[in-house]
Image (spheres, rainbow, N blue to C red):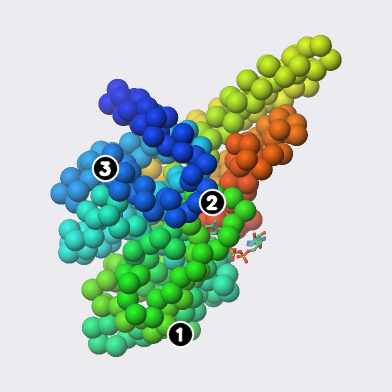
């Protein structure tokens, strides 16, 4: 079955008109991370935080393709940080609760997240590292009867400064391997929790936090899934996040290219439009082909994901190959804008800064290439 049907396309028109009327005109405001918090309820009121969440948990009960439509349209808001913030909340935390949470967690917590009354983030990375999590995660959860006592730090956490809940990867036994971790949903209003905001070079709409847990007592009923399988759940959940973000990245590159084409058509050089120079025409054609190939790749993998037959290898390929290609396209588009593109407030310049994180956050390119080589038995 094709990824999109008429209903999805109808939804796309609805989303696009809301984004163009409500979000895009405020793109500059979204450079302030505090503003994003105030928009979660609006996003929730449009149903965008629970498109594929079953209706009994407050969602719209659609299939995964609705999430893909939204991911493709979000770049039109011209604030990629907003797409990232929303993506972590609804494509990462909520699916974890739906897949592994208890019925009580699904009934009590998912609906408030879907309505945007509360905001969530996922906290795995620590100051000691994010790639080799099994060795670098020190944040510990000591067993104390009905409670975990959580101590440690998490760094670079999307939504951290605005989150009401963080789904934290915590070590439950000091020296064990990948089966020594739990995912615990920590309410951020508990004693001992502290957060500070980190200043980033891009995606400013998405608040990035440094979290500190000082003997935070969290009821064990907030454990998501089995207490020894947290790492496995996290790795599986990353597939969806990586895929959905790549879908947005490709759509963003297509928008930037569209704007660049308009620019080279109107910019005059040597008495002719810049776009008449063969070197420019060829560069544009190459970028268009690259975007189209990437779009078809991510959509085809999204279809496999929807049908439950996605391969980890393909997701890793997307995470480095598509993201690196998007960065190259955007760098070239910026070049074709000349000095205008270098201005701090120019949209293409902002996109250039925003997309730099695509080959770092959620798994660095180098680690993805190692994984792909592993799938190829190298
Ligand atoms: C804006 C932003 C938002 C983020 N949001 C979150 C979040 O919400 N939750 C969360 O848990 N984390 C988050 N992260 C953290 C992110 O996932 C980590 O930064 C990432 O996993 C890399 O970890 P690291 O920064 O510790 O780099 P390291 O693991 O220290 O790696 C540093 C560098 O070493 C090189 N390297 C690494 N592995 C290899 C390899 N196998 N082969 C060759 N070279 C290699 C790469 O060049 C890499 O960039 C976020 C990061 C950013 C920047």
Percent x, y of residue 39: 36, 47
Nearest the camera: 63 or 257?
257
* Up/down of 290 relative to 58, above or below: above
- Contact between marks 2 and 3 (CB within 8 A): the answer is no
Task: Judge the density around disc 1: few (<14), some (14-19), many (≥20) Cα neighbours within 10 Å.
Answer: few
Cα gap from disc 2 to disc 1, whole angstroms? 36 Å
Q: Nearer the viewer, residue 162 or 28?
A: 28
Asked if the residue under mark 3 is in contact with the one under mark 1, i.e. CB atoms within 8 Å, the reply is: no
Corner quadrant of residue 62: top left
Please give the residue where the numbered disc 1 appears in the rendered image.
Answer: 174
- Residue receiving disc 2: 204
First in sequence, mark 2 or 3: give its number: 3
The residue depicted at 32 percent of the width and 53 percent of the height is 95
SS at circle 3: helix
Dot 1 lies on which element?
A: loop
Q: In this view, does 372 lie to the left or right of 149?
A: right
Q: Which mark's residue is nearer the viewer, 2 or 1? A: 2
* Residue shown at the point (38%, 62%) measured from the top left: 163
Label 2 vs 1, first from the N-terminus: 1
Q: Quickly name the residue at label 3.
A: 45
Q: In this view, does 290 lie above or below 271?
A: below
From mark 2 to mark 3, how far is it between C-alphas?
23 Å
């Amino acid at each position: 079955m094709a990824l999109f049907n008429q209903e999805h396309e109808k939804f796309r028109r609805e989303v696009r008109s809301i984004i163009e009327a409500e979000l895009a005109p405020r793109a500059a405001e979204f450079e302030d991370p505090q503003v994003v918090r105030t928009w979660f309820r609006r996003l929730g009121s449009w149903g965008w935080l629970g498109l594929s969440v079953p209706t009994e948990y407050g969602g719209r009960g659609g299939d995964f393709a609705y999430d893909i439509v939204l991911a493709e349209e979000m770049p039109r808001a011209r604030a990629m940080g907003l797409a990232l913030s929303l993506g972590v909340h609804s494509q990462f935390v909520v699916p974890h609760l739906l897949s592994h949470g208890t019925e009580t967690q699904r009934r009590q917590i998912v609906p408030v997240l879907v309505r945007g009354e509360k905001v969530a983030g996922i906290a795995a990375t620590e100051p000691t590292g994010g790639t080799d999590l099994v060795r670098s995660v020190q944040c510990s959860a000591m067993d104390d009867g009905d409670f975990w006592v959580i101590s440690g730090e998490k760094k670079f956490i999307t939504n951290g400064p605005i989150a009401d809940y963080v789904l934290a990867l915590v070590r439950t036994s000091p020296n064990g391997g990948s089966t020594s971790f739990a995912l615990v949903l920590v309410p951020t209003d508990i004693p001992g929790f502290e957060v500070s905001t980190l200043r980033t070079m891009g995606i400013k709409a998405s608040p990035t936090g440094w979290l500190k847990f000082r003997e935070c007592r969290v009821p064990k009923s907030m454990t998501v899934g089995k207490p020894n399988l947290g790492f496995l759940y996290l790795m599986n959940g990353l597939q969806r996040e990586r895929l959905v973000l790549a879908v947005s990245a490709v759509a963003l590159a297509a928008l930037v290219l569209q704007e660049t084409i308009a620019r080279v058509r109107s910019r005059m050089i040597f008495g002719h439009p810049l776009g008449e120079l063969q070197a420019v025409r060829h560069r544009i054609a190459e970028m268009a082909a690259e975007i189209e190939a990437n779009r078809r790749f991510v959509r085809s993998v999204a279809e496999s994901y929807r049908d439950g037959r996605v391969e980890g290898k393909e997701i890793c390929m997307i995470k480095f190959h598509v993201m690196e290609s998007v960065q190259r396209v955007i760098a070239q588009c910026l070049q074709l804008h000349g000095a205008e593109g270098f201005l701090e407030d120019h949209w293409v310049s902002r996109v250039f800064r925003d997309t730099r994180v695509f080959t770092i956050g959620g798994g660095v390119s180098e680690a993805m290439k190692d994984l792909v080589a592993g799938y190829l038995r190298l």
